[in-house]
Structure formats: structure tokens, C-alpha cells
Image: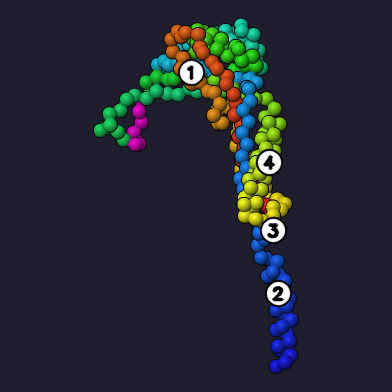
């Protein structure tokens, strides 16, 4: 009986340190935010042509002719081939209208025509040319909606600056909280980048984006670049004592 008691005591002694090691340390978790507002370095414009016809050929021919004129007008402003790329090209059938009461999910509808859509994205380094590119594109035949998207160069470097500022913000918050709680702030135990999968550009982060509906003649287009806003957020867990 005495031998069994000794073995049980030894077993308890062996597991006690492990249980103690699993005891959570005192910690504090804070979120740090940072926001940078930067003047844009370049703009990205989307302009397009939409045409239709009873068959593909006339719709495509008209579309190609008008897009050729739009590209020529843009190049006449000094833009190069590398600044212009096709972003969307689509040929889509137009089906006959069907009355609701006669609608059948498995029924085939006759094709009565075709739409052809061709859109280009233009990169402009000189922001003073943004309005001119839009106006000249419209004059040459652009009739599809597009956007003006202002962006910044060296985005990685700017994001690194924002992350450093976010860490500093998190540490400041942690210091205020620990001082108020009369505890000592320790080293960071974990850091999480909460925006690691976010795409940063002026459209996503609240920068200036003009929806351009190109129809008939327009007065000179007012375009204001404003500032591109870059934001980031981190979560830092600090030890305390």
C-alpha cells in the first residue's frame, strides 16, 4: 500500500509542471490603425464602345471602326501603345422578348440581334490630361460607361509606412490601457496584419472616382484628382505583468 502511494505521488509531481506551463499569461490585445493620404501619381481611365446589329458582322464592324477612331484620338494626345490595353471584349446575343405568361425555362428563344462591347483601359501619367482623354474619346465615338481611378506608385513602400504607423498606434493604446490598469506593458507576443489580403487603390479606399456616362456632347469634363487614401490595421497581443 505504501509503495502505491509513493508511485501516485511521483506521477502527480511529473504532471504538475506541465499544467502550470499551460496557464495563460497576462496579456492585452489592441488594434492599431493608420491612414495615409497621398497625392495620386497616375490615373486609369476606362472607355468603351457598345454597338448592336441584326448579325454579328455589322455590329462588330461598326464597333471596330469606332474603337479605332477612339484609340487614334487618344494617341494624338501623346499616349503610347503601352498606355492602352483592351480590358473587355464581348459579343452577346440579343434574344426575342418573351411574354411572362408564356415563359418556359427549357424553351429556346430566337436570337434577334447581337451586342458587341469593347472597352479599353488607358493609363495617364500626366493628370492634367485626364479630362482631355475623356473628352476626345467621347468625341471620337466612345459611348460606354467607364471610371476614372487615381492611383499611387510604390504602393508597397507606402503600405510599409502605414504598417509601421499602425504598430506605433497599437503600442500607444496598449500603454494607455496598462497605465490606467496599473500594470506593466511587456513585449508583443503576436502581430496580425488585418488587411493582408486587401487590394489597395483609390476605388477601394475611398479615393476620387468619377463614373463617366458618355452619351452625347459634353461640356469640358471637370476632374479633380484629390488624394488617394491608404489604410491599414493590425492586432497586437502584448504580455503584461
**Residue 63 in picture, x, y percent from top left:** 49, 13
Q: Earlier in the sequence, mark 2 or mark 1?
A: 2
**At numbered mark 2, what does the secondary structure look like: helix, strand or loop?**
helix
Disc 4: which residue: 168
| Nearer to the camera, 182 or 140 | 182
Q: Nearer the viewer, mark 1 or mark 4?
A: 4
- Whether residue 25 appears in magenta in the rendering, the answer is no
Q: Nearer the viewer, mark 2 or mark 4?
A: 4
The residues colored magenta run 105-110
- CB contact under 8 Å: marks 3 and 1: no
Q: Earlier in the sequence, mark 3 or mark 1?
A: 1
> Which residue occupies 68% across, 70% down?
19
How far apart in space, not on screen, are marks 2 and 3 (Cα)? Answer: 26 Å
Q: Quadrant of residue 79?
A: top right
How far apart in space, not on screen, are marks 1 and 4 (Cα)? Answer: 40 Å
Q: Which mark is residue 241?
A: 3
Q: Earlier in the sequence, mark 2 or mark 4?
A: 2
- CB contact under 8 Å: marks 2 and 4: no
User: Crowding near pointer 4: few (<14 within 10 Å), some, many (20+)?
Assistant: some
Disc 1: which residue: 212
**At numbered mark 1, what does the secondary structure look like: helix, strand or loop?**
strand
How far apart in space, not on screen, are marks 3 and 1 (Cα)? Answer: 58 Å
**At numbered mark 4, what does the secondary structure look like: helix, strand or loop?**
helix
Amino acid at each position: 500500500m505504501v509503495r502505491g502511494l509513493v508511485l501516485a505521488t511521483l506521477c502527480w509531481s511529473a504532471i504538475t509542471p506541465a499544467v502550470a506551463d499551460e496557464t495563460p499569461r497576462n496579456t492585452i490585445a489592441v488594434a492599431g490603425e493608420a491612414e495615409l493620404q497621398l497625392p495620386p501619381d497616375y490615373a486609369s481611365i476606362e472607355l468603351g464602345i457598345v454597338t448592336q446589329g441584326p448579325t454579328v458582322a455589322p455590329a462588330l464592324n461598326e464597333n471596330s471602326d469606332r474603337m479605332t477612331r477612339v484609340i487614334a484620338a487618344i494617341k494624338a494626345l501623346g499616349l503610347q501603345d503601352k498606355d492602352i490595353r483592351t480590358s473587355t471584349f464581348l459579343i452577346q446575343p440579343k434574344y426575342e422578348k418573351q411574354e411572362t405568361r408564356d415563359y418556359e425555362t427549357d424553351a429556346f428563344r430566337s436570337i434577334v440581334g447581337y451586342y458587341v462591347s469593347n472597352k479599353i483601359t488607358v493609363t495617364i501619367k500626366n493628370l492634367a490630361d485626364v479630362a482631355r482623354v475623356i473628352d476626345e474619346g467621347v468625341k471620337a465615338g466612345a459611348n460606354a460607361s467607364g471610371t476614372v481611378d487615381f492611383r499611387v506608385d510604390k504602393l508597397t513602400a507606402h503600405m510599409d509606412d502605414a504598417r509601421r504607423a499602425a504598430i506605433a498606434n497599437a503600442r500607444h493604446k496598449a500603454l494607455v490601457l496598462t497605465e490606467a490598469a496599473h500594470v506593466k506593458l511587456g513585449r508583443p507576443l503576436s502581430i496580425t496584419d488585418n488587411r493582408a489580403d486587401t487590394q489597395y487603390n483609390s476605388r477601394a479606399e475611398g479615393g476620387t472616382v468619377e463614373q463617366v456616362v458618355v452619351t452625347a456632347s459634353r461640356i469640358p469634363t471637370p476632374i479633380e484628382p484629390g488624394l488617394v487614401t491608404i489604410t491599414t490595421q493590425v492586432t497586437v497581443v502584448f504580455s503584461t505583468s
